[in-house]
Amino acid sequence: MNCLHLPFLKSLASNYRVVLASGSPRRKELLDRLGMSYEVIPSDFAEDLDKSQFATAADYVLENATIKAHEVYRKIKSQTQKPLLVIGADTVVVNAAGAILEKPESAHDATSTLRNLSGKINTVYTGVCLIVGNSNESQNPVVEKAVESTEVQFGELDDSIIEAYVATGEPMDKAGSYAYQSLACFFVQEIRGDYYNVVGFPCARFYQMLLALHRQGHF
């Protein structure tokens, strides 16, 4: 795999303990492309927030990402001598009616979700939270947060296609019950926005967040 070996990222990886607070293989694969050392410590957050308490899906997904990052940061900050950079992320899909769709609870749930998405536009939101800090309790960590959104236009799906797709098992661990980077590429007619956001990690937005922290002198 080709990687970007940028000087400030090399310095970051050398001087900071960089942690991805997510077990997502898609996020790990994309982060690997920056060519910096990091470790994976998934958050234990149950993701059980009441969606009705949030004005928008963007607010909801950003809060999830923030809680994940803070949970891992608090858990490990006393275990390292190096400063920390913790990366939290969360992705949801919002259907045309405005309902937030996360990972399906069953094959029946996935089937119902895909029927609802058929022939319509859905929007993928990913919240990203970066926490920069150290074990010094007297200093508050620096927190950088952002949300990326991408519109996805589905083609018309009949039941035979939906049933065949669900039978592959692919929808079962995906927000919105589909993976555009895999078999769902046959269903999506168009996207408007960051492709990698649909995959689960908005690379360009993440890079700009890192660059902003670097220019502020944090690493």
Image: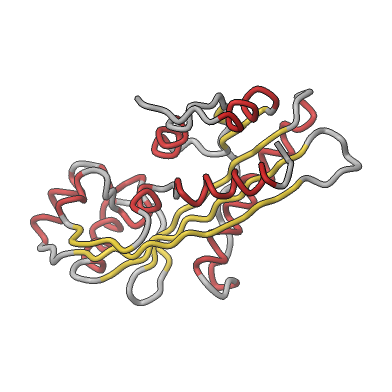
Rendering coords of residue 17 (x, y %):
67, 27
Seen at 13% across and 63% down, the residue is 157
Q: Quadrant of residue 135?
A: top right
Q: Is 167 placed above or below 110 here?
A: above
Instruction: Locate residue 92 relative to residue 177 in the image: left or right.
Output: right
Instruction: Locate residue 99 relative to residue 87 in the image: left or right.
Output: left
Seen at 39% across and 38% down, the residue is 26
Instruction: Locate residue 51 relative to residue 97 in the image: left or right.
Output: right
Q: How many marks on residues?
A: 0
Applied colour scheme = secondary structure
Q: Is 51 placed above or below 7 here?
A: below
Q: Nearer the viewer, residue 162 or 74?
A: 74
Quarter in which the C terminus is drawn: top right
Rendering coords of residue 77 (x, y %):
76, 33
Q: Which of 70 and 149 is in front in this view?
A: 149
Rendering coords of residue 50 (x, y %):
57, 65
Quarter in which the N terminus is drawn: top left
Seen at 56% across and 75% down, the residue is 55
Q: Which of 144 and 208 is in front in this view?
A: 208
Q: Is 196 placed above or below 30 here?
A: below
Seen at 70% across and 50% down, the residue is 143
Rendering coords of residue 46 (x, y %):
57, 48
